[in-house]
Amino acid sequence: MGPVFAVDRRRKFRVRIVGRRFALLALLFVLFAGPALAAQGFVPGIDDLPLMPGLAAEPGAVVFDKPTGRIVEASALGPDLSAGAVRDFYRRTLAALGWQRTGTLVFVREGERLKLVIEPTDTAGVRVRFDVAPR
């Protein structure tokens, strides 16, 4: 018998596990969609690219919308992040969002190419550059 929670003195309800399929789907959702949903906003100019928690967007993103596609150059700082953590986050998140990896940190989707450049900063942490261009 599962846990019993009292709603009021007259009613009680039980929490039951729905089944193995539901648990498997929930696990897959947390593994693949969780990083994207946990993000604290989006990369400036790229409204469908989540900003990793711990990264702060730098002002001055450049956005050009051309008939052949968009061109976006944006960057973010992560004072307490490592390059490996950023790389792992975006590899998982971008794959879940339909981007296919074609290089170390180069991805393509629907006629666009996204390149990430992760650089160490003078202080601890990293700067991440996001470059989107038509393929």
Image: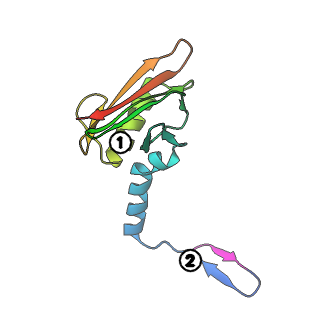
Q: Residue at point 39% right, 37% down?
A: 90
- At label 1, the amino acid type is Leu
Percent x, y for residue 21? 37, 68
Q: Quadrant of residue 25?
A: bottom left
Q: Residue at x 74, y 88 (%)?
A: 10
Residue at x 30%, y 33% (from the top left corner): 133
Q: Position of residue 69 (x, y in %)?
A: 29, 39
Q: Nearer the viewer, residue 55 or 18?
A: 55
First reached walking from the N terminus: tag 2 or tag 1:
2
Q: Which residue is mark 1?
A: 94
Task: Single out the residue that lies furthest toward the top.
Answer: 122
Few, some or many C-alpha atoms within 10 Å of disc 1 (few <14, some 14-19, many ≥20)?
many
Residue 125 on image: x %, y %: 53, 21
Q: Residue furthest bottom?
A: 10
Q: Quadrant of the C terminus?
A: top left
Q: In the depicted view, which residue is nearer to us: 25 or 100?
A: 100
Binning the other alpha carbons within 10 Å of mark 2 as few (below 14), some (14 to 19) or many (20 upward) gives few
Q: CA distance from mark 2 to mark 1?
A: 41 Å
Q: Secondary structure at mark 1?
A: helix
Q: Quadrant of residue 49?
A: top left
Q: Is residue 5 magenta?
A: yes
Left or right: where 82 falls relative to 117: right
Q: Residue extending furthest right?
A: 9
Residue range highlighted in magenta: 1-7
Give the percent coordinates (x, y) of residue 95.
32, 44
Amino acid on which the number 2 mark rests in the picture? Met
Q: Is residue 20 left or right of residue 79?
A: left
The answer to whether residue 50 is above or below residue 63 is below
In the figure, 118 relative to 65: above or below? above
